Image: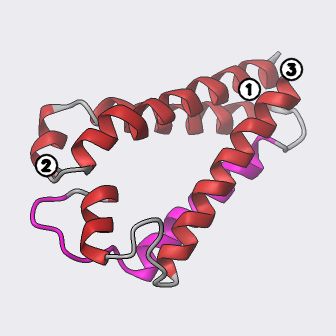
């Protein structure tokens, strides 16, 4: 069961990392118009450009780090890292619904997508990583 959860989490993060890599390379997908894509995936007030290659690449590295961490041998460091990853995902999910985040990123369709898809996906990742952390600690 833990192997299946690790596989689901890793594959999901690798797919999301691949999309961020496309953006880092300047390939706008799945929306070809840069402004429309930025409004859908970033959503900050008045945004017209996607984040730069460095910012997108940093997200790629972080996501791949999370995807790989689940496959470390069981030890205390693995458990603590998985717990930390879970906390990051849960915080990301929670702030999607916070009033300050709604003020910072009011653009549509991001606001709707964040509350309907992005944040719930972060909750799922957070729960999976919390389960994996518990299993690694046992």
Quadrant of image for the C terminus: top right
Foreground: 60 or 11?
11
* Badge 3 element: loop
Label 1 sits on residue: 132
Quarter of the figure with the N terminus: top right
Q: At x 47% / y 70%, what residue is drawn?
A: 29
Report x, y in % for residue 78.
Answer: 76, 37
Of circles 1 and 3, which is in front? 3
Crowdedness near tag 3: few (<14), some (14–19) or many (≥20) residues, C-alpha within 10 Å: few
Sequence-earlier tag: 1 or 3: 3
The answer to the question of whether label 1 and label 3 lie on touching residues, with beta carbons closer than 8 A, is no
Q: How many other residues sit within 10 Å of disc 2, few (<14), some (14-19) or many (≥20)?
A: some
The quadrant in which residue 100 appears is top left
The answer to whether 21 appears left or right of 35 in the picture is right
Label 3 to label 2: alpha-carbon separation = 39 Å
Name the residue at 25% across, 39% down: 112
Q: Of label 2 and label 1, which has the lower sequence position?
A: 2
Secondary structure of the residue carrying numbered label 1 = helix
């Amino acid at each position: 069961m833990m192997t299946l959860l690790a596989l689901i989490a890793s594959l999901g993060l690798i797919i999301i990392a691949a999309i961020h890599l496309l953006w880092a390379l300047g390939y706008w997908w799945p929306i070809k118009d840069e402004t429309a894509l930025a409004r859908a995936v970033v959503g900050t007030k008045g945004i017209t450009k996607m984040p730069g290659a460095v910012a997108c690449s940093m997200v790629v590295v972080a996501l791949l780090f999370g995807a790989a961490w689940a496959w470390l041998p069981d030890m205390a460091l693995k458990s603590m890292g998985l717990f930390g990853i879970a906390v990051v995902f849960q915080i990301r999910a929670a702030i999607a619904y916070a009033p300050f985040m709604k003020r910072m990123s009011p653009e549509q369709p991001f606001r709707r997508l964040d509350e309907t898809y992005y944040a719930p996906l972060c909750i799922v990742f957070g729960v999976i990583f919390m389960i994996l952390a518990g299993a690694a600690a046992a």
